[in-house]
Image: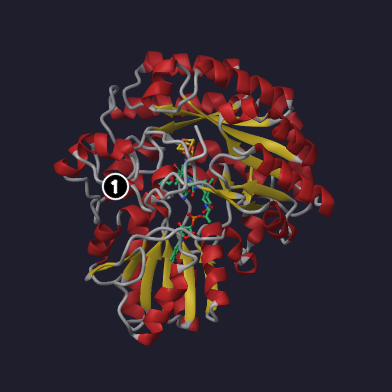
Amino acid sequence: MRVLLVHPSPLLFSEIYLRLEPLGVERVAAALLQAGHEVQLLDLQVFQERDFHAALDAWRPETIGFSLNYLANVPEVVDLARAARRKLPHCRIMVGGHSASFIAAELLDHADGAIDCVVRGEGEAVAPQVVDAFAAGTGLESLPGVVTPDGSGPPPLLLSDLSLHTPARHLARRRRRYFIGHLDPCASIEFTRGCPWDCAFCSAWTFYGRSYRMLTPEAAVEDLAQVAEPNVFIVDDVAFIKPEHGMGIADAIERRGIRKQYYLETRADVLLRNREVFERWVKLGLQYMFLGIEAIDEEGLKRHRKRTHKTENDRALEIARELGLIVAVNIITDPDWDEERFAVVREWALSVPEIVHLTVNTPYPGTETWLTESRRFTTRDYRLFDVQHAVMPTRLPLRQFYTELVRSQDILNRKHMGFTALRETAGIALRLLARGQTNFLRMLWKFGSVYTVDRLHGDHEREVRYPLRVPEAARVTRPSRDDLYVHHPTAVAPVAP
Ligand code: B12
Ligand code: SF4
């Protein structure tokens, strides 16, 4: 079958700081290619909606698979599915991905017949089975993780071996548009999947049932060796939880003489525990590290169930500095913050040399806060669930909240964009420009035009055609395993904490 896989357009966040290749779609594409299907990939982060329509007209796919990792992309994907259904009535349409997995039934309702099924959980093993069933005209309800308007299959299954489907990176066109900061262009890679912690605001652990799986170092580096870009974003939720795994990959990279620059994300306690692994990776080319700090006080850390302490966070930042890394940290802005609290956080952020991002506390389906907080939502607009908007009541009037948020982020950005910093970045920008890479340079000037109070506030006024569904009271008070997990926890014991 001819299968068109589509990744939706970027959100506010990625207009400024980064844009990354759709790795999940590339892995599903690899599995479909292995099963003998013809596959095209269209990433609307770097293509336009008109390119989607052109692909329907010119290639006439027999199946379309939409990727829906982000809740904010729900209306876009529903509209694209409806448009495709009108244009190609016989084309079968499936939707998969992180967010789609938590809201399968409501997605099917919004689409009103335009989506044939939602594939919950990991897509590599089941997507080829779905396409085969489409081709044969047989039922889908026996397939694991598949939900149709007529019923659901058994729970989704975890892949037995992550190395079976090397991402079909060759299908992602315009690859030079993917970047993060000055790592431009930048590819992505996955060394491990899942997270054994259980932070209250996060759905990484509920998606994978708290499992944690690793590619063998050989398989990980075989994949890395296929990457053409000089820079690599490691997408693992928490890098190098197992020191021997990080060291094993490092050994294999050295054996093969691979030289790249890397970005990764990890936790403060993992950095403290496995300092020598990160030290080794700095020698291999590790440049950027994102540390999930989330709060600057014990109370906040406890509320998010981060299972780290302020002293650990402070020490981890010191170590990252000692290692010479460029470090970005995130602080979760609570809608309850007043001017004073914003000022305290700004003061802290200005006192540390790290890049500090502020995101807004946003309960997502699949998180515990979704169950405990969703009654308080002030909006049903999926598009506002992008961690840049307030979806719960703010203590300050909404416009004032955004004024404080934008002002704080602006002050924090200028910390890195001041005259001295700009002189330093100018060299990088010019080198990239000489190679035709303009993503980083554009990023430097974009913040003020993209991230504005008027835009954030005005976004609340948009018409809501597909209202988000909040969980029923019974599910909130007595959540079942199905309410929390996509992949149910298996017999595999969590490795941490
Ligand atoms: C890398 C990453 C990004 C990249 C984007 C990469 C990209 N273009 O896809 C960047 C840094 C830009 C990003 C940004 C954001 N992200 Co992000 N991101 C991730 C991360 C860490 C890894 C994604 C990944 O590549 N995984 C590996 C691949 C192999 O898995 P996958 O994409 O999930 O795909 C599998 C399945 O989902 C499924 N599948 C996917 N597509 C399809 C399609 C079909 C047809 C089928 C059948 C199956 C299928 O099969 C795939 C293979 O098993 C995830 C966390 C995670 N562990 O997944 C968060 C995550 C997806 N991001 C999240 C969030 C909140 C965001 C932001 C809103 C803010 C933020 N915190 O950074 C922004 C906005 C994004 C935007 N659209 O602009 C949340 C999602 C929350 C939600 N429910 O909406 C996650 C889950 C992290 C978390 N727990 O908070 N992100
Ligand atoms: S450690 Fe990171 S990935 Fe794991 S549950 Fe917490 S926030 Fe999510």
Q: How is the image coloured?
A: secondary structure
Rendered residue at 64%/47% (across/down): 233
Tell me where residue 219 appears, x and y as whole percent.
68, 58
Amino acid identity at mark 1: Arg
Foreground of the two, 192 or 176: 192
Q: Is residue 132 above or below residue 446?
A: below
Q: Is residue 89 above or below residue 246?
A: below
Residue 336 figure quarter: top left
Query: Which type of secondary structure does the marked residue at label 1 adopt?
Result: helix
Q: Is residue 143 above or below residue 412?
A: below
Rendered residue at 24%/56% (across/down): 465
Horizontal side of 293 relative to 336 (left or right) equals right
Tell me where residue 249 appears, x and y as whole percent.
72, 47
Residue 397 figure quarter: top left
The residue indicated by pointer 1 is 481
Foreground of the two, 41 or 202: 202
Foreground of the two, 339 or 228: 228
Tell me where residue 453 appears, x and y as whole percent.
40, 33
Rendered residue at 45%/83% (across/down): 60
